[in-house]
Image: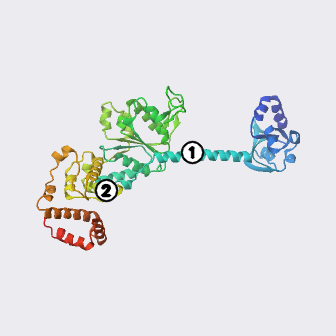
Amino acid sequence: MENNPAEFVEMVMAAQPWIKSLIESIYDGVLIVDTAGQVRYVNQSYLKITGLNESDIVGHPLAKVRPGSVLSQITKSGEARMGVYRREGNSEYVVDMAPIRYQGQIVGGISTVKEIARIQALSKELEKYVKKNQELTSVVSHIYHARYTFQDIVGASPEIRKAVSFAEKIAQCDEDVLICGESGTGKEMFAQAIHNGSSRAHMPFVPVNCPTLHSTLVESELFGYENGAFTGARKGGKVGLFFVADNGTIMLDEIAELPYDMQAKLLRVLQERKVRRIGEAAERPLNIRVIAVTNKNLLALAKEGKFREDLYYRLNAMTLEVPPLKARQDDLHLLAEHFLSEWCKRNGRYLSFHASAWDMIDNYEWPGNIRELKHVVEFSAYLCEGGILHSLRLPQQAASTKFTPDHAASLHTGSLKRIVENTERAVLQSMLKKYGDSLESKKLIAAQLGISLATLYNKTKYLLDNDRT
């Protein structure tokens, strides 16, 4: 048998009829030759593609029937060749060729033939799937899009600049992150900025508010489920939020509120980067970055048995602390001006802070941090009837016990002339502080106040240069 490979090929084809049935079921054309280059077998698909009859090719030397064929060379060299283009008449096809080996000896060669038209059809079909996938990816990326970058974080204090600098470094690596800080300090803005500053910026950013997840549905929401996984399951199954965030970032807000049993499953995801949907037997790999956010002391909760200690230490490897507003007093005016300016742009109005409003901002403790400052400024702006924001709508208890603006009271006492002068002085001081003292700045201020540049100079000289308050 080893001395006569041609007889070996013929014997195998004859002795194993199931081999012939198997080859006949293949859609592509199949041709087999012996080491002498004589054709021993072709299937019906080969004959259909090439337009030949079986008697025209089987039992004949391949080189004679198919001039230019290199399959005989393959049986001598032992090296396969892929994607060889052939054309016979109106037929175009691609051929893959390989030697047939048995017990270390080459006993023949085999070629598979695929029509160019079929390849083109498959290519078009693949293009459709690729296009559909790109469209779905685009939709997901649009819905789950991170808006904020590091440039959107307002503040010049050393505390906030230090936090931003550290966050920019974190963004460059691909590790999971734990962001800690009081409520309202802008932790989600930092999470979005980290995502947008990373290599995942063009992929989904999926925020998950852990307290809103129903305790009985949290696993299906995060990991999804297979079709028919349980009674009431959606037909076709459900894609979990972790899979939506694949190749991107998932932000787990208020991670301390995640049910205790789910914390163990989250720990496994963080360690293995694999997720098993409910109802599936196998885990699926995930390429994902996790950013956990909390305003709680996770270590203290872990010591109390309310948070998994192993999960805490896994998350705590890279921690970002966002400073509270009370630690960045230098940013108070900057933030207030920013929020008022943004409100004015959205509402087509121009407002400025009166000195009395600045006193209220400086004297209030802002327990709700940046979120509270933003809401107070915007709500006060909506209620302001003129162009000057004299006071802020602080919480009732703060207005009655925390703040006694003697300066504000003094501005509204005395003769009408004095009240008008004090108000004009406060406006000019506020606008000069905001826009500067240059000629261009003064032109802008005059235009916004509806007065001439000369009038502005006169009022500045009278009210500011000769301060009579």
In depth, the one of 45 and 99 nearer the eye is 45
Is the residue 138 above or below the residue 23 in the image? below
Q: Earlier in the sequence, mark 2 or mark 1?
A: 1
At label 2, the amino acid type is His
Q: How many numbered discs?
A: 2
At label 1, the amino acid type is Asn
Q: Do the residues under discs 2 and 1 have CB atoms within 8 angstroms?
A: no
Residue under numbered circle 1: 133
In depth, the one of 319 and 443 nearer the eye is 443
Instruction: Find residue 299 and report its horizontal and vertical position in percent.
Output: 31, 36
Q: Is residue 317 left or right of residue 143?
A: left
The residue lying furthest to the top in this view is 231
The residue lying furthest to the bottom in this view is 454
Residue under numbered circle 2: 338
Circle 2: element type: helix
Q: Residue at x 87, y 47 (%)?
A: 64
Q: Residue at x 72, y 48 (%)?
A: 83
Instruction: Find residue 377 and report its horizontal and vertical position in percent.
Output: 27, 52
The disc label shown at residue 330, or none: none
Quarter in which the N terminus is drawn: top right
**Residue 108 visible (yes or no):** no
Residue at mark 2 to residue at mark 1: CA–CA distance: 40 Å
Q: Is residue 361 left or right of residue 4?
A: left
Q: Is residue 339 left or right of residue 171?
A: left
Instruction: Find residue 361 and report its horizontal and vertical position in percent.
Output: 22, 53
